[in-house]
Image (spheres, coloured by chain):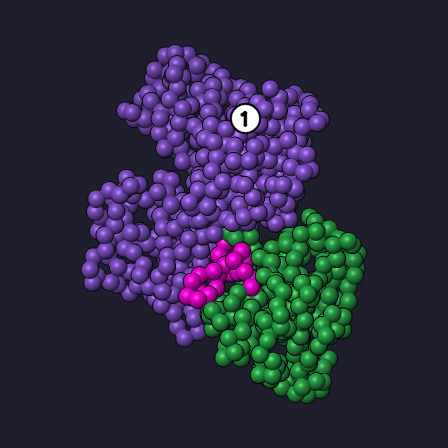
Chain colours: A purple, B green
Amino acid sequence: MSANAPTEKKKGKAVPRTAMPEQPASVRVTNFNEVTLGYTPEMALTEANRCIQCKKPLCVKGCPVEINIPGFIKKIVEGDLHESYKVLRETNSLPAVCGRVCPQETQCEGSCIMGKKGEPVAIGRLERFVADTFMASDACEQLTGTHACSLEHEGLKVACIGAGPSSLTVAGYLSSLGIKVHVYEALHELGGVLIYGIPEFRLPKEIVRKEIEAMKAQGVEFHTNWVGGKTITVQDLIDQGFNAVFIGVGAGLPKFLRVPGENLIGVFSANEYLTRVNLGRAYTFPAVDTPAYTGKNVAVFGAGNVAMDAARTAKRLGADRVMIVYRRSEKEMPARLEELHHAKDEGIELMCLNAPVELIGDEKGWLKTLTVQKMMLGEPDESGRCSPIACDGQFCDIPCDMAIIAVGTGSNPLMTNSTPGLELNKWGYITVNEDTGETSIPNVFAGGDIVTGAATVISAMGAGRRAAKEIARRLLG
Amino acid sequence: MPSRILKKRSLIPGQTSELVLDAPHIAAKAKPGNFVILRVSENGERIPLTIADTDKKAGTITIVYLVLGKTTAQLETLKEGDDILDLCGPLGKDTDIHKYDGPVICVGGGTGIAAMHHIAKGHHMAGNHVIAIIGARTKDLLLFEKELKRFCPEVLVSTDDGSYGHKGLVTEILEARLKADPTIGEVVAVGPVPMMAAVARTTKPFGVKTVVSLNSIMVDGIGMCGACRVSVGGKTQFACVDGPEFDGQLVDFKELSSRLSAFKAMEQISYEEFKKSHVCKCSH
């Protein structure tokens, strides 16, 4: 362990970023196992040594939950993984998840000083390495050194509606301070988008389950099949004496394209397709009962992470050809870089500068043909990306028996409709105080997609952390 | 959370049963028109079923199902005292109920009669004179006549084979009634898609408000996946959060029928596998 000597660190600059072992593309398209395999201890040590331990670390500013990044990496270098895990858990309730699904290139790694001249430190991969080593081995012991995290504040209780990343963050944070947290989830399984949205090959469900088990050990109580706004309302929870309520009900109804033919059989929203495959485990049908239709020629509309997930899922379920149909060019694609690379490696075709204009079916209502129109790039629009302009008269028909629409989601009305006095913006999302996450109703907080519209796991977690801090401040002083 | 089966009653042996479930948190909130989503086993599929009745005092809800695939066949194997693994609700919008001067006609076909029962009861509670028109292929397949008679001043029956009541279709009774009584306030129809479409066609010339309750395929049932989308008046609507009840004159029934067939082949595979394994167990 001479690795922490200063000379080693200087030398670190020349060491290339440690590659992540992964299943070869030809093999992984035939299974749903995780694509990336994780660092070995040797790889982690090599990579950890590339961190130059900045005095004013920019990476931490780039992290929505403000992980002490140089801190946890330093502990890897020192060989104290246990301590490294503790550093992660101080601010992040789901490190094994974040190490896998965060868009690090625009957050911590995007800010890493090493990236200015060369390649940034692989912070996400290191986070995953440490989290996987210690994940849920005994959460209480990790945190407190004892086998039971007893509640310290018997009288205080907080309710979270939804069991996705934002609520889990609130639950993890507050329970570690000894506050009782009850989480109400509408689906039969816990984890929200981590379970129904992100595929097994990118985030094994076992990881999510273990993280949740760790929270149970910390005293969090989970209630499945409780639909926020239906089975239980905010008022019910206030009446039951909860000191604060956090609304983290996640994404809402999928957006559609408003082109003719999108209700044909074979046309799915990405939410439906992924929910069938992930929550329903349809990739093991008929061992499970939830079916997922698989086409031969599959078109996916959209180019974000969800589109990549849907495309790669269709490939694994046996599609011959999977096309990402996108109005802009590859440069504008919003997907996480690694997902785009993985998709291309797996043979997903990028059909850029094309927009769907019609879906055509047979006499029985099954999708058969997709008509696209050529596009070109114009001036940047309000999103900063070049806006697509349709090229007159340039249409093309493509054989297509399955289409997946992954162009985002709107707000879910169940919770917001059932909560009188809850202020919403013009899109139906909940308005919150940006510093505290508090809604227009005192002591009722909200975060995640129901506030921002479709965004990332980590931004939802950041919102959860903000709200949890404020709740803790109010309850504990 | 699991939900215990308190009572099970076979309505049509081997085909249709009624379950009374211990679900106080759902019963407390359930209104006519609502449905639940349930899952029978660890590898099971989520399916929607309309709530046929509620007893808020007892904390129970009643559901009625027709065995037509693996999930319902599995449900049929459960007995009183068994648990349903997952049950969530009440979902969907409540039926829009108001007091009319004239009667409200509630039309039900097949298992839809049970779903219609809850809506009819809601209209009755609001003070409406409810006429129930129910139909089945033959007398033995008719459901809920007695239950409806408890509060409906008139229960009119049709069977395809004439074994009971009017020989013919429910829409024939409906049409005669609409002709005879111009004060009909509203018509509600719950049943197979062709029946609901026929009811909408029948009421159209009379200009009577016609509500249909749609049974589209659902996955989550909580406004997330869009599987249940239907075209209503040319607009995409979601049966789980915008419905399940819509204006019968505006629903694209042809599209609904087509979408309901999307997974037929795979549903068949599941069901056949289940029947094989089930027979197997019995013979050992």
Occupied quadrant, residue A218: top right
Position of the C terminus of chain B, as image quadrant, is: bottom right
Residues drawn in magenta:
B225-245
**In the displayed structure, does residue A14 sit left or right of residue A267?**
left
How busy is the neighbourhood of tag 1: few (under 14 within 10 Å), some, or many (20 plus)?
Answer: some
Label 1: state its secondary structure. helix
Circle 1 marks a residue in which chain?
A
Does the magenta-highlighted stretch encompass residue A436? no
Occupied quadrant, residue B63: bottom right
Taking depth in this image into account, of B250 and A400 the one nearest to the observer is: B250
Question: Does the image show residue A155?
Answer: yes
Residue B229, horizontal then vertical, whole percent: 48, 61
Residue B194, horizontal then vertical, whole percent: 54, 76
Q: Is residue A294 above or below residue A363?
A: above
Residue at x-position 56% and y-position 62%? B244
**In the displayed structure, does residue A333 sit left or right of residue A247?**
left
From the image, tell me which residue sits under label 1. Answer: A470
Does the magenta-highlighted stretch encompass residue B231? yes
Question: Does the image show residue A318?
Answer: no
Residue B272, horizontal then vertical, whole percent: 62, 69
**In the displayed structure, does residue A62 sit left or right of residue A279?**
left
